[in-house]
Amino acid sequence: MAILLQISKAHKSYGDQVLLDGAEATLSDNAKVGFIGRNGAGKSTLLRIILGEEELDSGEVIRYPNLRLGYLRQHDPFQPGETSLGYLKRDSGQPDWKCGEIAGQFEIKGAYLDGPVAKLSGGWQTRLKIAALLLHEPNLLLLDEPTNFLDLRTQILLEHFLQGYRGACLVVSHDRAFLSATCNHTLDLSHGKLISFPGKVDAHLVFQKEKREQDIRTNASVLAKMRHLEEFIAKNKARAATATLARSKSKQLERMELTALPTTLPTVTMRAPQIQARKGPALRCKNLAIGYPEREIASDVNLEIDHGTRAAIVGDNGQGKTTFLRTVVNSLTPLSGEVRWGHGCQIGVYAQHVYTSLPENQTVIDFLHSKAARGKKDQEILDIAGAFLFRGPHTLKPISVLSGGERARLCLAALLLSNHNILILDEPGNHLDVDTVDALGDALLAYEGTVIFTSHDRHFAHKIATCIIEVRDGRVTTHGGNYDSYVYKVNKEVEAGERERANDRVKLPPEIEKAQKPAGLARVDMEPQKEIKLVEKTIASLDGQRKALQNRQLNTNSSKEFDTLQGEIEAVAVQLSEAEDRWSELFAIVEGFA
């Protein structure tokens, strides 16, 4: 186990806000670390410090010579008109075949690989950025909220990759399901300190809770003993016969210490709108077609959602989940058919188009007062504001200076202060930390109304969904099982695709098999430009064979099988070396060097 990076006695402040206070941590080459902490704790700041984009006030970050950092950036690094393959080649400097092989791990192929990046959805562009990152062969990946805006299928692809990734990674995420599936260590930033835990995030949270409870019990016991000693000393220090014993007890009292407990952070609590439960259908869609004048997204939509249902709208990015939500709330006109809401439905909407059009001249607290249902008390409004990180002077901020994330949180806070009996929530967990997402889930579980939502957070969706509606391949249909069964189905589809790609890598294309002799790669009687493409395919296939054999070798417990696999690996390595030599010869011919 080699150390890649160390953080030592790190201090970082912004004015009165202390983010790092003597923080220490070590990252080794075999650790997959989930990095957690409340919003504003300083997680993203620490990532920027590790990358060298910010400096510590004091302390140091020690980067060992073997460290190769890879960082998944949130901004788009693409050039106008660039294709996916063109971007991968430009960014990495790797040949076509290598770029195609890595892109294939994330199902980027065909039109997705050869077409323009600009036509890809946000989720597919994130897949592309991850593929580009891996082409640089880092041994420590820094992933800052990698699941934001990723659909379930892409999350599972990324999970599978990280599970098999032989390097280290530091993953910032509020998605507990993703962290549990990918990370075997936890790093918790709290009160300026970094707490390392050799286990998964759920075990860490349980351990921290139990440790605090144990410390409280220990302190209570110590306090009781201290009071007993103080009483004994007070009664006996003036008596000659017991003065010596009193002095001894006094020294014992001086040695006793209480365990320091970190300041308890405010507990996030919130209540959903208090409304009267209703029965019967809340929403009916009949012969509905959704989309845009130039393009139909889905047709023949016939479904019914009852009052009290919490319906999760699921499906891959780009399939039309948001289009469906916009249509049912009348933000988008149906192409045909009808959307009918039940009598007395009062609909509240949380979506991106809502929080981009807030009144700029209002303050946070004025806006919440204007949206709160009649009869809401000032303290209840302040409690909800605080739950979404608007506390003290932050409640007096004008909306005009709020960031996109702050505006999103403000809209969600306002929605919970309303009296709507229907809530439409498009990715409500984005911009929220783990505790706030959990509190929102608890509030929705107690809500008597109807919830129709999309979410990429599996922990959240599993917690609250009672109905699954899938948008896929031009259809909007009710999934027959619960959310766990839907995740299982998608997981199996992803695994089937991965097996198919693995088989494709091991099996050589027919034209290459003809061009290849047992002793190695034969010369092919064709133009160099055509032959070089065949050789690149051969290299990719042989490299895939070698990796598959190496993975089998790593997982075997049999020394005999290990030796057999080693022989096969060496044989493939010889063929791979010959193919790479031939590629170099052809490249020299094509470029005019030979």
Image (cartoon, rainbow, N blue to C red):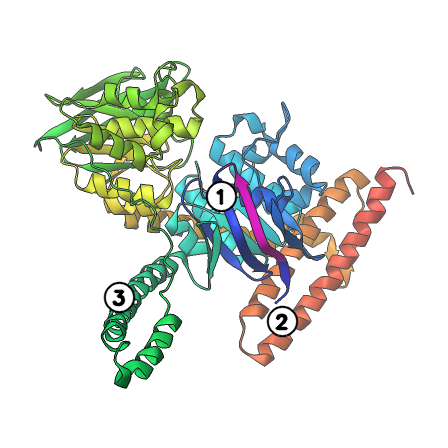
Q: Secondary structure at mark 3?
A: helix
Q: Nearer the viewer, residue 377 or 455?
A: 377
Residue at 89 percent across and 37 percent down: it is: 592
Residue position for label 1? 18
Upstream in sequence: badge 1 or badge 2: 1
Q: Secondary structure at mark 2?
A: helix
Residue position for label 3? 220
- Residue 270 locus on image (x, y percent): 24, 38
Residue at 21 percent across and 32 percent down: it is: 380
Q: Quadrant of residue 473?
A: top left
Residue at 52 percent across and 48 percent down: it is: 20
Q: Amino acid at mark 3?
A: Ala
What range is drawn magenta here?
5-15
Q: Is residue 169 above or below residue 100?
A: below
Horizontally, residue 382 falls left or right of residue 405, namely left
Q: Is residue 122 magenta?
A: no
Q: Is the magenta region chiefly helix, strand or loop?
A: strand
Horizontally, residue 6 falls left or right of residue 329, namely right
- Residue 516 locus on image (x, y percent): 73, 56
- Residue 400 locus on image (x, y percent): 42, 18
Horizontally, residue 164 falls left or right of residue 491, namely right
Residue position for label 2? 565
Q: Is residue 130 above or below residue 4?
A: above
Crowding near pointer 1: few (<14 within 10 Å), some, many (20+)? some
Upstream in sequence: badge 3 or badge 2: 3
Quarter of the image for the N terminus: give it.
bottom right
Q: Secondary structure at mark 1?
A: strand
Q: Amino acid at mark 1?
A: Val
Q: Amino acid at mark 2?
A: Leu
Query: Does any portion of residue 385 appear in the rendered image?
Result: yes
Q: Is residue 11 magenta?
A: yes
Upstream in sequence: badge 1 or badge 3: 1
